[in-house]
Image: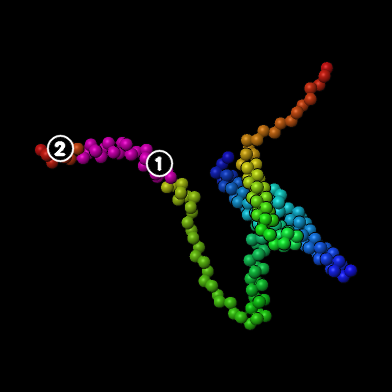
Amino acid sequence: MSESELGRKWDRCMADAVVKIGTGFGLGLVFSLTFFKRRMWPLAFGSGMGLGMAYSNCQHDFQAPYLLHGKYVKEQEQ
Amino acid sequence: MVPRVWSLMRFLIKGSVAGGAVYLVYDQELLGPSDKSQAVLQRAEEVVPPAMYQLSQYVCEQTGLKMPQLPAPPKLNFHFRDTWNSGILTVMSALSVAPSKAREYSRDGWEYLKERIK
């Protein structure tokens, strides 16, 4: 992986993390205000979900060149 | 009868707000792949500053307030990655020549002392 490609992947990871954590926080805020009587836990839950999804995406993005994609081939009975 | 209708209305309003938020997230693919999130962020960076500027202009016009003109922020032309890389290269090359340089300087110092003692 070249350095420019690595830099692009990091940029994508950071942008993805910002968007996902913000979205999770926003959804948690909406649900906290509408259904959960302004409690704090939906915000923490939403932010944590967004952070986890962003981490998973980043991990997949960085491991992508080394992931082997295989498929099962059934043996033909002769 | 009326309180029940009112509580039902309240539930429907809250449900529609929450459902609308969820649909917005699904429609804009905010929780999708990372390249879509990056595109959304870039779109937001293009749209939000002009919208904020227009809003501030509208508020100034309606209220009659005058927003003070802030000076432009200084543009930094500092390339952190290049300076860091060149710093690392300088440090590593200095470390690699350090033993030979130390030997050379100590030999020169010893020669100088021998000359002075004579």
B2 shown above or below B65: above
Q: Along the line of sight, which residue is nearer the eye, B115 or B60?
A: B60
A27 shown above or below A53: below
The answer to whether residue B99 is magenta is yes
Instruction: Return the residue at label 2.
Output: B114
Figure coloring: rainbow
Q: Quadrant of the N terminus of chain B?
A: bottom right
Kindly identify the amino acid type of the residue bearing the numbered disc 2.
Answer: Lys
Q: How many neighbours does mark 2 have within 10 angstroms: few (below 14), some (14-19), or many (20 or more)?
A: few
Q: Based on the displayed image, in which of its 4 quarters is residue B28 positioned?
A: bottom right
Q: Quadrant of the C terminus of chain B?
A: top left
Which residue appears at 74% of the width and 30% of the height?
Answer: A71
Q: Based on the displayed image, in which of its 4 quarters is residue B95 positioned?
A: top left
Instruction: Return the residue at label 1.
Output: B92
Q: Which mark is residue B61?
A: none
Kindly identify the amino acid type of the residue bearing the numbered disc 1.
Answer: Met
- Whole-percent x and y of residue B102? 28, 38
